[in-house]
Amino acid sequence: MTEIWIDIIINILIIVLLLIGAFVTLSASIGIIRFPDIYTRLHAATKASTVGVASVLIGAFIYLYAKEGIVSGKLLIGILFILITAPVSAHMIGRAAHNSGIKPLTKNRTDAYEEAMQKQNKA
């Protein structure tokens, strides 16, 4: 009886992780289309890869481990690689865009990076 409940809980966990990944990826895709500038679009794309893809891969890992008894090192490395590289690459792309002269849409916001660069140039 306990094994049946454990299987049900594992199946629910896998389903929830896959649905979260699908929802985050879908909403990030809509965000990439609808957001106004490169910085907000970059934020949407980064969240899709880190949260969406990682949760799908974690769901796949749990499925393989629970149902097939396989510990997939490739999935673990893929999860780790995505969680490390996506935020760093988004930061570098955003910095390159700012350095090339693309200004963010600043409605009631300040450009903290530009202010820091002006302070550094004055010193």
Image (cartoon, helix red, strand yellow):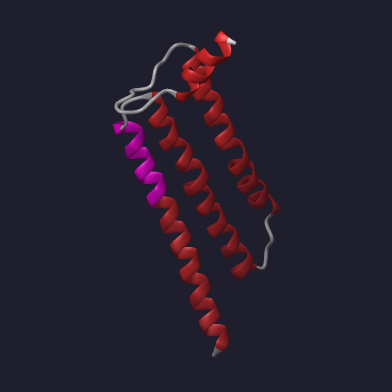
In the rendered view of the protein, which quadrant contains the N terminus? bottom right
Residue 66, position as x, y percentages in the image = 61, 69
The residue drawn where x is 63% and y is 45% is 78
Residue located farthest toward the bottom when viewing the structure as drawn: 1
The residue drawn where x is 35% and y is 24% is 37
Residue located farthest toward the top when viewing the structure as drawn: 122
Residue located farthest toward the front when viewing the structure as drawn: 123
Q: What stretch is highlighted in magenta?
A: 23-34
The answer to which of 106 and 65 lies nearer the viewer is: 106
Q: Is residue 23 left or right of residue 75?
A: left
Residue 4, position as x, y percentages in the image = 52, 84
Asked if residue 107 is positioned above or below residue 82 in the image, the reply reads above
Residue 7, position as x, y percentages in the image = 53, 77
The answer to which of 2 and 36 lies nearer the viewer is: 36
Which quadrant would residue 70 be assigned to in this image? bottom right
The answer to which of 101 and 19 lies nearer the viewer is: 101
Q: Does the magenta stretch include residue 27?
A: yes
Asked if residue 78 is positioned above or below residue 5 in the image, the reply reads above
Q: Does the magenta stretch include residue 43?
A: no
Residue 114, position as x, y percentages in the image = 47, 18
The residue drawn where x is 38% and y is 51% is 23
